[in-house]
Amino acid sequence: MRTVRFQDFELDLRTYDLRERGEKVDMGGRAIDTLVYLIDRRDRIVSKEELRTEVWNGAALSSATIPTTILEIRRALGDSAETQRFIKNVRARGYQFVCDVDAERSFMGDAAREQLQFAGRKAELESLLQSASDVRRFGSGRVVAIQGEAGIGKTRLLTELLSRTAGDLRAVVSRCSLIDGVPPFWPWTQALESAVGLAAGAPAFLERSRQLANVHPEVLGTVQPSGREAVPLDRFSLFNLWIAAFRDLAAAAPLIIAFEDAHLADLDSLDLLSCLAEEIEEVPLLLIVTHRPPTYSDKRADRLAEIRGIENSRTIQLGPLSTEDVVSMLGPRDARTIALGGSLCERAKGIPFYITHLVRNLDREEDESNSSKTESARALSGREIVSRQLSDLPEGVRSTLATASLIGDRFPASLLAQITKRSVSDIADELTVATRSSLLGQDLTEYEFSHSLLRESLSSTLDPHLKRRLHLSIATELQRHSHAHSRTAQIADHLAEAIPLGDGSVASRFARLAGQEADSRFAYAKASKYLERSLDLFPDDGAIADRCELMRELARASLYAGDRSASRELLLESVDLARAANDSVALALSALQLAPEFLSIEVGINDATHIRLLEESLEALDPDEFSLRAQVIAHLAQALQWTRDPERLERLAIKSMEEAATSKDREALIAALSARAESLHGPARAHERLHYIERLGEVANVVGDQTTVLLKHTRAIAAHLELGDIPAVERENDRYRSISSKIDLPQYRWYPLAHDSTLAMLRGEIKRGECLAEEFRSLAGDSPDQNCLQTFAAHFALRRVEEDRCVEALPLIEACAEEQVWMYHWRIAVPWFYVQCDQIERARSYANRFNSCDLQLMACEPGGGQALAMASEVFAALGKTDMCEQLLNILEPIKARCSTIGYGVGYFGSLARYAGLAAQALGMTESAISLLSFAATDERERGAPSWYAYAEADLCGSLLAAGATANSCIARLDEVDRALEGRALPRAARKVSEARDAIRASRFA
């Protein structure tokens, strides 16, 4: 018998009985395990994290679990925290067994067998230790990804690191779980609960934790919620709050945060993890992510790849152990360990998990003569090892574990008892057998499988019909009993697995509740998954209005998750259902949701389907549906933006204002004000448009509608840029940026950078503008809307113009004009670029497509200033005096306005210059001089060097024609050269040079 003796106590390592002077001492199984572990490592301090990993098999524990177990041991031994005769508590570091021990020789050999020595990962451990050292030394963050197959030793390597750095870095470990139906951001809430115990000296972290408790009720047992109004209100601010919390904790003292099995995490949690990895450069935080190699190609794999690709990140790839590594794990090197190590390595393919379980199957008595059992263990292959260990269990225990495997990686004994209709005591007795065999870990009344491979193997033994019945029983018990945290997603998962057993409508309802819960916490990928399932399970005889509402919820989640096409398809299908059911309200709501939330209508898109559905909805709605009618009319007005019918658009916008006033509904008023502002496009009506834009902002602020507040700033930016008020543009853009930084939706976040790029190019900073353009395009994500794509295209073209490389942009301009046939500023750009490329006849042929009516419509288009500007330059170059005369009449009254592209995302100079070019073409020299002088002064004061150069070059031509001396004109151009000095503006420099050459040539004429 193998026995450990200390003072009056005797510990039998075969039966795990503790006796005092021959009398058995009552002590729980986990307490015995902990005592054995501490005795075996009595030469050093053992950290709480090491105990959690080695004794509890890495289970997620409450902060009280290990101290409670230590208290149980002390009571059994007659010890206390004051005397500490047996177990010493080393503050902030862990525990140490301090009593003298009389152990038989075989004790240490058996301990090595149960907890095999760490071997074969020297280089990997040194790499991790170096990263930890860098974090402490430089006070900056590092990211390490540990990648390897199941059972390869990722957790063991992490545990070894944590053990060796316990005195230098605090550690927070969160295990991503296979538990069905966990709440959104489950790995993060587990990390938060663990981190709270380390928060002494980190008041900022505790305050942010309280704010997070308002959003995540799962942590209420650990963190008290803030008394403030619940925050945050959007996904991006939620991410910022999480990141700030852990940055605050790391700033208080160097920190390790480890996320184990990240391949099991939901996409939303990985999104947040990727964001944290990007934001730790300036704080002493070592972020460790362990995961299996991706066997899939989806966004989760992409997020893990992003994390591995971050600057200052390292990837540790774990492979199988060598034979020498396995031999060193077994203890002293001798003939037996060499032979056994070789066999183990061959059969287990060098996988540490399988090797450990092979060793555990050897007879626990150290009987070298019993070779048959050793040979039996050697004959096993990797996967067979798990089956062998399970087959050695009593049949009842196996059956209980198989049922538990359906609950999840972690399960309470009480739930298992309810499902199997047995007592908790009976269940606990059976689970103790599994715990002794290291198949389960235990945390008070909850248990956890030591490895997902065990759970998978157990689950696969169940008959499919029995499996469905058990899933239904689990769901039923979860519904029957009250729990502290939301279980809707867990219930939904079990009900789905039980199909076709159970009530499909109930399964649909719980899936919908789970989706709504995820959506409310900004976990849009998870919301889409559950809402899609709810729709699949929705009963055929269910109410059409309810089905349409569910489809709209799924469409919204899909849009925010980045799948715009799926969102649109769902809404169109919802429209068909509503139409068939004669449900005018459902029809209208679906039609309204077809419009994206960015500018209510995408730039340049004449969506005939959307227009038709809005018109159909308006006709079907009852006359007294004032609020809904106002919104439909408003959206219809905006949808007509690109149909070249500005008069109808304005009539509808005014009508929507009337309906909204009657309804007294602020949501309707917001829609109406938005439409009214949209009906006033064009540089001539900028001040009038600003009036409605400001009203829109006032109402949106009252109701707290941040999306509409952003819309207000967007439109105000465009109006102020047309008015040439650059400081106002910058103020509005900064306000927009402040709000959009709190919203993690691509269609909002890119816009401020687009304006930064616009202003950089206006100031002649072309390279900076290019960098900003690349950044805003990247921010827009994988599924950008037309607003972003067209802005990016316009900026590319503008840069090529300023770089005097117009020919390179010509194919893009031609393609955009062909695609965006409703947008004048793309179509007129084609002949303008032909002129710049000296393709005059092609320019003439294309320009002949435009007539006087087109010029009037250009003046009413968003970004119409640019269309008018390019038209002036084209028709002046082609000598089309009739068109130049009309353009002069349009532009001269608004000479103080500026030519802008789209919703203020591009600057194309003072309209006074283009009026001056039209006057030049008409031979109206004095008017041309007046207008071009106005433009040159305006551009110089605005700080737009290239546009100042263009205006002066044009002006000098008119001045010379009016009799000015060549020297005076050259002096003006010399001043322009000084303004261009040090700036990379090749086209502007060429235009000035050509003007100077023309002046000099005139001397010899």
Image (tube, rainbow, N blue to C red):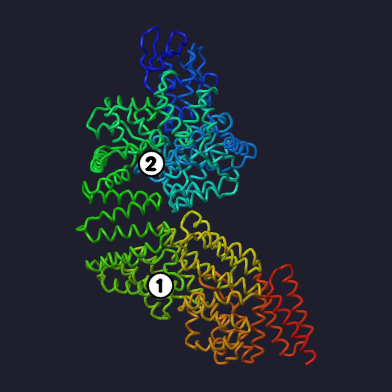
**CA gap, disc 2 to disc 1?**
47 Å
Please tell me which residue lies in front, 549 or 687.
Answer: 549
Identified at 25% across, 58% down, the residue is 546
**Which residue in the rendered view is the most extreme toward the top?**
21
Q: Is 345 on the left or on the right of 218, as rendered? A: right
Residue 598 position within the rendered picture, expressed as x and y whole percent measured from the top left: 44, 64
Residue picked out by circle 2: 178
Question: Can residue 657 be spotted in the picture?
Answer: no
Q: Looking at the figure, which quarter contains the N terminus? A: top left
Q: Quadrant of residue 599?
A: bottom left
Identified at 52% across, 44% down, the residue is 244
Please tell me which residue lies in front, 964 or 262.
Answer: 262
What amino acid does circle 1 point to?
Answer: Gln
Residue 624 position within the rendered picture, expressed as x and y whole percent measured from the top left: 26, 69
Residue 600 position within the rendered picture, expressed as x and y whole percent measured from the top left: 42, 67
The dot on residue 638 is 1
Above or below, comparing residue 230 to residue 873 in the picture:
above
What amino acid does circle 2 point to?
Answer: Leu
Q: Looking at the figure, which quarter contains the C terminus? A: bottom right
Tag 1 secondary structure: helix
Please tell me which residue lies in front, 130 or 647.
Answer: 130
**Mark 2 or 1: the one toward you:** 2
Q: Is 671 on the left or on the right of 951, as rendered? A: left
Disc nearer the start of the sequence (2/1): 2
Crowd band around label 2 with a 10 angstrom C-alpha radius: few (<14), some (14–19), many (20+) = some
Question: Can residue 506 be spotted in the picture?
Answer: yes
Residue 826 position within the rendered picture, expressed as x and y whole percent measured from the top left: 52, 77
Q: Is 100 on the left or on the right of 78, as rendered? A: right
The dot on residue 539 is none
Q: Is 137 on the left or on the right of 567, as rendered? A: right
Tag 2 secondary structure: loop
